[in-house]
Image (spheres, rainbow, N blue to C red):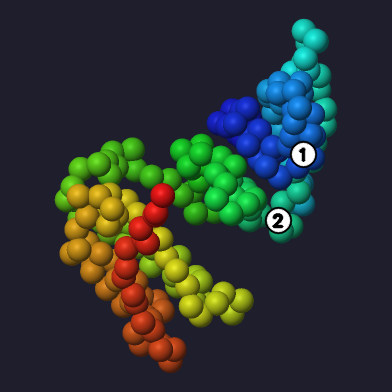
Amino acid sequence: FLNAELGDEMLGWLLRWTEVGDKARRRNMWSRGSWTPRTATLTSVSGAALSFRVGVAVRGRKELEHVESELPLPHAVETVDGLRDELLRLSAEPADKGSEPALAPGSSAALLRLPGATDDWSLPRDLWLNTTPYPREVREMVYSDVAAAVQAAVADPACPRRMRLLVAPPELNMEMDSYRVGSMLELVRKVSASPPRRLVASAARSTAVVSRPPCRRS
């Protein structure tokens, strides 16, 4: 599945998190293009790591040089759900402050369809987020997913009690002219009062703060 859906885009993981990226940066420091990874093929998967065969273009050679590389998972996993979560984490987390994610959002979204996951999560084919206002069923889908994520975080003792939630489809994005404060208030109500764990009825004191991102200065 990963080879078919992502293919060579999986190089983003290897360049960011493995020795392949470190070697490419060292070899290309003084002469760009001396050692350039071009292809990535997943060869095996375990609960702790993914193994790859990487094709590298070496200056002066016509054929690709092939090297083996292992991508360790942030945490060991035993299920497909766990594997999907760790791959999403590797895709989204920048290695350094200000750097881009290892995979583009459109590519990492394919991981949500990873075969064998128990929830079979996927977006409807007729979901159009560039039309506002959204139909109620679309808004409810977004609200329900956000509420489920918050409830799972609150139920986890290891999760900090103070958390930040970023939700930015066009209708909930304060930076866009499609922003609708009514949708934001609906979302806050859904997160605060949805079963099975209603935050407003729990023993913990809950406060919801809605604010726009800070302005970026050049």
At 22% across and 55% down in the image, what residue appears? 179
Camera-nearest residue between 94 and 68: 94
Q: Which numbered disc covers residue 22? A: 1
Residue 95 picture location, percent across and down: 64, 50
Judging by the rendered image, the residue that carries numbered circle 2 is: 74
Q: Residue furthest bottom?
A: 203
198 sits to left or right of 85: left
Which element is circle 1 on?
helix
Camera-nearest residue between 208 and 204: 208
Q: Residues within 10 Å of mark 2 (few under 14, many from 20)?
A: some
Residue 6 picture location, percent across and down: 58, 32
- Using the rendered view, name the quadrant where residue 184 is placed: bottom left
* Amino acid found under the numbered disc labelled 1: Asp
Q: Residues within 10 Å of mark 1 (few under 14, many from 20)?
A: few
The answer to which of marks 2 and 1 sits earlier in the sequence is: 1
Which element is circle 2 on?
loop
Task: Identify whether 160 is placed above or below 3.
Answer: below
Quadrant of the image containing the N terminus: top right
Q: Which tag is nearer the camera, tag 2 or tag 1?
A: 1
Task: Identify whether 13 is placed above or below 30.
Answer: below
At 37% across and 62% down in the image, what residue appears? 214
* Amino acid found under the numbered disc labelled 2: Pro
**Residue 148 seen by the camera:** no
At 44% across and 89% down in the image, what residue appears? 204
